[in-house]
């Protein structure tokens, strides 16, 4: 029997974030900017909830979102990701793109 860490509020926060289609759009735009791609090469809607979860696990350095609740660095990274996403959302609303 393996003792897998049990998810708590941070794992739930990560799951809700990854199921948000707007977060997928944020990752689409972020990837276009970082990769110097245009929308034809990476259209909106490319990141599925599963893609978002995979990206988030990689960014947080964990294999499972449940691990975030038990890892200070992963929690800090999740907080940063949520803050960056929130800033993006604010910018979208200010530009009337939300």
Image: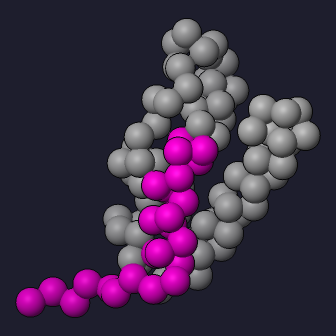
Near-viewer residue (41 or 91) = 91
Q: Is residue 75 above or below residue 21?
A: below
Q: Residue furthest top?
A: 40
- Determine whether, in the image, residue 51 is placed left or right of residue 18: left
Q: Residue furthest right?
A: 94
Image coordinates for residue 92, horizontal then vertical, percent: 80, 39
Residue at 75% across / 56% down in the picture?
86
Quarter residue 44 falls in: top right
Image coordinates for residue 59, horizontal then vertical, percent: 53, 55
- Determine whether, in the image, residue 93 is placed left or right of residue 59: right
Near-viewer residue (68 or 43) = 43
Q: Is residue 71 visible?
A: no
Residue at 41% across / 40% down in the picture?
48
Quarter residue 94 falls in: top right
Residue at 44% across / 59% down in the picture?
57
74 in the magenta segment: no
- Determine whether, in the image, residue 47 is placed left or right of residue 91: left
Residue at 75% across / 39% down in the picture?
98
Q: Is residue 54 visible?
A: yes
Image quarter in which the N terminus is found: bottom left
4 in the magenta segment: yes
Please report the bounds of the magenta region as a residue range: 1-24
Image coordinates for residue 47, horizontal then vertical, percent: 46, 37
């Amino acid at each position: 029997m393996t003792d897998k860490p049990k998810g708590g509020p941070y794992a739930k926060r990560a799951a809700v974030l990854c199921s948000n289609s707007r977060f997928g759009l944020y990752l689409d735009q972020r990837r276009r900017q970082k990769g110097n791609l245009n929308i034809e090469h990476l259209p909106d809607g490319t990141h599925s909830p599963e893609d978002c979860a995979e990206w988030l696990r990689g960014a947080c350095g964990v294999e499972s979102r449940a691990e975030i609740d038990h890892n200070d660095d992963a929690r800090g990274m999740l907080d940063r990701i949520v803050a960056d996403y929130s800033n993006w959302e604010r910018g979208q609303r200010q530009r009337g793109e939300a």
